[in-house]
Image (cartoon, grey):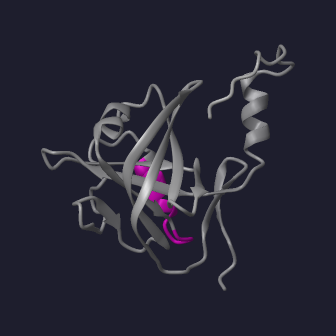
Amino acid sequence: MHTRFPRAEARQFDAAHFRQALSQFATGVTVITTRLADGTLLGLTASSFNSVSLDPPLVLWSLGTRANSLQAFSGNSHYVINILSAEQAHLAQQFASKMENRFEGVAYTLSRTGQPVLEGASAWFECHNRSQYPEGDHVIFVGEVEHCEVDPQAALVFHNGRFTKTEAF
């Protein structure tokens, strides 16, 4: 069921104010990775990650419509969502950069479908690219989790425009 309502009322704020308000919501940090048919590895930092369903196991994340990697992620059958641990802020920054090879110097293994899994992540989800929904200036990706692993650790968190960590447990 997809329900649409009439357009919202005119906004009383600008994009900068909206971004500042959003920055007050602390989020975990992920790196979404995939491998293309020619062997090229792609990865990007995303904080727009959430669970959708336990049965079937579904998760979601979103990617801007202007992202250079949109076509690659849209067309690939699988990807991995790596949940970064508290000590992996350098990976979040590297995969958010404009570097040509974001995997340079990064330790990873390959999943059963050949997708990159970052070493040291606190959890990872190997997903089948189930569906995509364009909304506003982003595309929402829904992945069906085919495999996941967990290594509980303190979390990397993004809040108020910067990285911070949760307490060790």
Q: Residue at x 48, y 66 (%)?
A: 88
Q: Residue at x 59, y 24 (%)?
A: 136
Q: Residue furthest left?
A: 38
The spot of residue 1 in percent (x, y) is 62, 35
Seen in the image, is 29 located left or right of residue 91?
right
The image quadrant where one finds the C terminus is bottom right
The spot of residue 111 in percent (x, y) is 27, 66
**The magenta stretch spans which residues?**
85-95
Vertical position of residue 3 compared to residue 167: above or below = above
Q: Residue furthest right?
A: 12
Q: Residue at x 50, y 65 (%)?
A: 84
Q: Quadrant of residue 97?
A: top left
The spot of residue 16 in percent (x, y) is 73, 27
Q: Residue furthest front?
A: 1
Q: Quadrant of residue 36?
A: top left
Vertical position of residue 132 compared to residue 91: above or below = above
Vertical position of residue 152 compared to residue 147: above or below = below
Between 60 and 6, the one lying in front of the other is: 6
Q: Main secondary structure of the magenta part?
A: helix
Q: Residue furthest bottom?
A: 169
Residue 102 located within the stretch drawn in magenta? no
The spot of residue 12 in percent (x, y) is 87, 19
Seen in the image, is 92 located left or right of residue 24?
left
Number of marks in picture: 0
Between 10 and 23, the one lying in front of the other is: 10
